[in-house]
Image (cartoon, grey):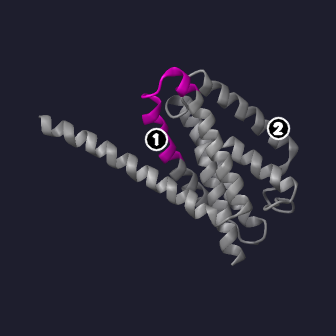
Amino acid sequence: MRLLLDILQGAGVAGAAGLRPFLPTLVSGGLAIANVGVNYDGTDFAFLESPVFLIIVALAAAASLGLERRGEGLEAGTIGAFYGGVALGLGALLCAGSIDDRHATWWYGLPLGLACAGLAQAAARDVFGRVRGRLDPDARAALPVYAEAAALLSAFGTILFPPLAVVVLGFLVWLLIGSRRRAGQKYAGLRILR
């Protein structure tokens, strides 16, 4: 049962990191320092709670939020690809670290975390990319704050209550399926006009 909870915790935090990578990493590292819900000490992932690593992550979070607040979306382009790679990498590390906390075999946490972060990233790119174009400039500037808040709450909730990961990941799947369905309907209508 403990293994299942640790897998759920890792998957939920990885999903949160797929939405926005830096605040979930900070939450996970901060809670690990306090030994609340997760603890990376004595694992191969002890660096996830080191102060130097957390300061670097905090600076990266401030930089990414600043870029997005200026109106440059992190869903596309070279910056988007780099940001997406960081999100996938941190998601994989956080998932494997959560499993390594209490279990000797943790390697499967890397592909699981990668998959959960990838799912969240795909859902976020579809939803935020579609919504960003419909908003006025003031609302568009607030969109990154909402995304960061969702990632933060998802990470915090799944660390303290791991079964919440099922809800978080299920919601992400629902968003992704709904977004893809709407895109398919939009192009189906265009084909009729031919």
Disc 1: CA contacts within 10 A as few (<14), some (14-19) or many (>=20): some
> As drawn, is 180 to the left or to the right of 26?
left
Where's residue 120, x and y in %? 54, 50
Q: Secondary structure at mark 2?
A: helix
Instruction: Look at the image and tell me in which quarter the N terminus lies.
Output: bottom right
> As drawn, is 188 to the left or to the right of 24?
left
Judge by depth and name the residue closer to the eye, 127 or 139. Answer: 139
Disc 2: CA contacts within 10 A as few (<14), some (14-19) or many (>=20): few
Where's residue 94, x and y in %? 70, 55
Whether tag 2 and tag 1 are in contact, CB under 8 A, the answer is no
Is 125 inside the magenta-drawn segment?
yes
Instruction: Look at the image and tell me in which quarter the C terminus lies.
Output: top left
In the image, the segment drawn in magenta is 121-141
Residue plotted at (62% across, 42% down): 20
Q: Amino acid at mark 2?
A: Ile
Q: CA distance from mark 2 to mark 1?
A: 30 Å
Figure quadrant of residue 157: bottom right
Residue positioned most to the left = 194
Q: Which disc is residue 55 wearing? A: 2
Q: Between disc 2 and disc 1, whose residue precedes?
A: 2
